[in-house]
Amino acid sequence: MPARLINGNELSKQIRSDIARRAAELTEQGTRPGLAVILVGDDPASHVYVRNKVKACHDAGFHSVLEKYEASMSEAELLARIDQLNRDPSIHGILVQMPLPKHIDPHKVIEAISTSKDVDGYSVLSAGELMAGLPGFRPCTPYGCMKLIESTGYDLRGKHAVVIGRSNTVGKPMALLLLQANATVTICHSATPDLAYHTRQADVIVAAVGRRNTVTGDMVKPGAVVIDVGINRDENGKLCGDVDFASVSEVAGWITPVPGGVGPMTITMLLANTLESAERVAATRG
């Protein structure tokens, strides 16, 4: 029986509708959620990403600021601008689009963002809050993956989840979120000698390595939930993920497509984090 599709587009619409409703209520009470997006340089993909993020903000009724700077912008200038935004009460989230020009240290930039406005969830403090199980902002892509799994009604308690990839932005936080949901988690990566050995035992697979056909049908346990985070292009230039969709969908119980799976959820969870930040500010004001 072919796998059931986990439709990220549909789930994203449902969540964004709720976000827009809550944002409107908050705005009526005097706090309009605000997101500042900073783009340094002329990376074509980054321009597309920030445009989509700003549009999503407008659609949700957020206050949105897009600031574009030349690649020659100095690190000191960028850090100074972030400091200004940290102190701007109309801004509840700050996002600096990666990658940055080589002369700017991304770690310094991420750490310069106030933790209360780190809606990407990338700072060391945000990572620590996640590891300790404390309230805080979750990185948007893993957060979206958890929502996708949740939408199926699948109970993660006691299940074996395999995360392929160990990045700070997806792999590691994904593993922690799965642990919080009481799954037993294995992290695989480029130095794992027999990937298929692990994936064949998995009830849930999250593939996040950025390499086509990392997971094929013969590597998947029948009925497994497969979440494909990868964004690649095949020999014809067509968008595809890390999972061989054709073969895996014949074995898995649930699967996300590429496009239309994880992608829409990443921006949606960015909105969710920004709204949460604004709601926290409103709560402190009484």
Image (cartoon, rainbow, N blue to C red):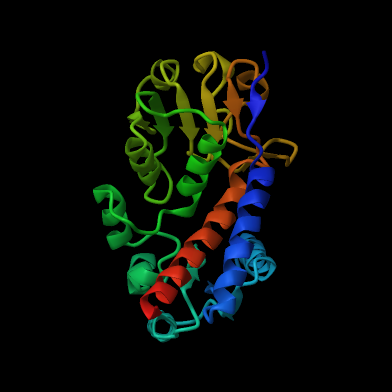
Q: Identify whether 189 is placed above or below 25.
A: above
Q: Identify whether 8 is placed above or below 57.
A: above
x then y, percent, for residue 85: 44, 82
x then y, percent, for residue 114: 35, 73
Q: Identify whether 284 is placed above or below 138.
A: below
In the rendered view, does 9 fall on the left or right side of 29? Answer: right
Quarter that holds the C terminus: bottom left
Residue lying at 49% horizontally and 69% vertically, measured from the top left: 95
- Number of numbered labels in the structure image: 0
Q: Can residue 46 be seen in this view?
A: no
Residue lying at 58% horizontally and 70% vertically, measured from the top left: 25
Q: Can residue 27 be seen in this view?
A: yes
Q: Identify whether 4 is placed above or below 14.
A: above
Q: Which of 226 and 133 is in front in this view?
A: 133
**Quarter of the image holding residue 88?**
bottom left
**Quarter of the image holding residue 189?**
top left
In the rendered view, does 217 fall on the left or right side of 207? Answer: right
Residue lying at 63% horizontally and 64% vertically, measured from the top left: 20
x then y, percent, for residue 39: 55, 73
Q: Which of 258 and 78 is in front in this view?
A: 258
Q: Which of 239 and 139 is in front in this view?
A: 139
Residue lying at 45% horizontally and 61% vertically, measured from the top left: 120
Quarter that holds the N terminus: top right
**Quarter of the image holding residue 6?**
top right
